[in-house]
Image (cartoon, helix red, strand yellow):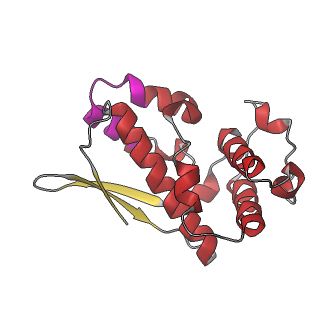
Amino acid sequence: MSFWDFTRSPASARLLVDFGDERGVSRAAMLAGTGLTDTQLDDPNVEVTAAQELRLTGNLLRSLGQPPGLGLEVGLRYHFSAHGVWGYGLIASATARDALALAMRFLPLTYAFTVITYSEETDAGVLNFVAPELPDALSRFCVERDMAAAAILLQETAGGAPMWFVKR
């Protein structure tokens, strides 16, 4: 299954709109062509499709000139609380290893657009992020965002300990 098969809560779309708003992008410009309203982004019962979130992301990128690193900036906002029940499951896990196992098992419940895999090497756990087949700027944004969000979640579940390695 791919990310196209899953709907998501509006929390990620809200984060994107708020980020754009802070940088002077109008909410109307952000939401153009998505079929979403600003009010819907505050309704936890609304379901957002992958296509809607990607359209919103594309609007953000176009409005800001597609700067490299924008996905990293946005990804740093994806704390466990942004992920709803999935995020709370991570933070409530007994160990960081348990949290990672839960995260990988229920990855479709995230906002990730990359294919994320995990493997263990002799002295490190390795997360690998495979870029989605999307236009270049959008794909780069998704990889950056998903990597930064994963780093934040690992930091929060491990109590800030730098115990992980992330590669692209």
* Image quadrant assignment for residue 160: top left
**Stretch in magenta:** 90-103
The picture places residue 31, in percent across and down from the top left corner, at 84, 53
Q: Nearer the viewer, residue 7 or 20?
A: 20
Q: Main secondary structure of the magenta part?
A: helix
Q: Residue furthest bottom?
A: 136
Above or below residue 82? Residue 146 is below
> In the visual, does 79 lie left or right of 101?
right
Residue at 59% of width from left, 77% of height from top?
136
The picture places residue 88, in percent across and down from the top left corner, at 48, 26
Residue 157 covered by magenta stretch: no
* Image quadrant assignment for residue 106: top left
Residue at 78% of width from left, 32% of height from top?
42
> In the visual, does 56 lie left or right of 121?
right
The picture places residue 113, in percent across and down from the top left corner, at 55, 58
Residue 95 covered by magenta stretch: yes
Q: Tell how many labels.
A: 0
Above or below residue 127? Residue 76 is above
Residue at 87% of width from left, 44% of height from top?
37
The picture places residue 156, in percent across and down from the top left corner, at 39, 33
> In the visual, does 18 lie left or right of 75?
right
Above or below residue 139? Residue 85 is above
Q: Quadrant of the C terminus?
A: bottom left
**Residue 2 visible to an observer of this rendering:** no
Q: Nearer the viewer, residue 14 or 95?
A: 14
**Residue 111 visible to an observer of this rendering:** yes
Residue at 41% of width from left, 57% of height from top?
116
Q: Nearer the viewer, residue 34 or 31?
A: 31
Q: Nearer the viewer, residue 137 or 54?
A: 137
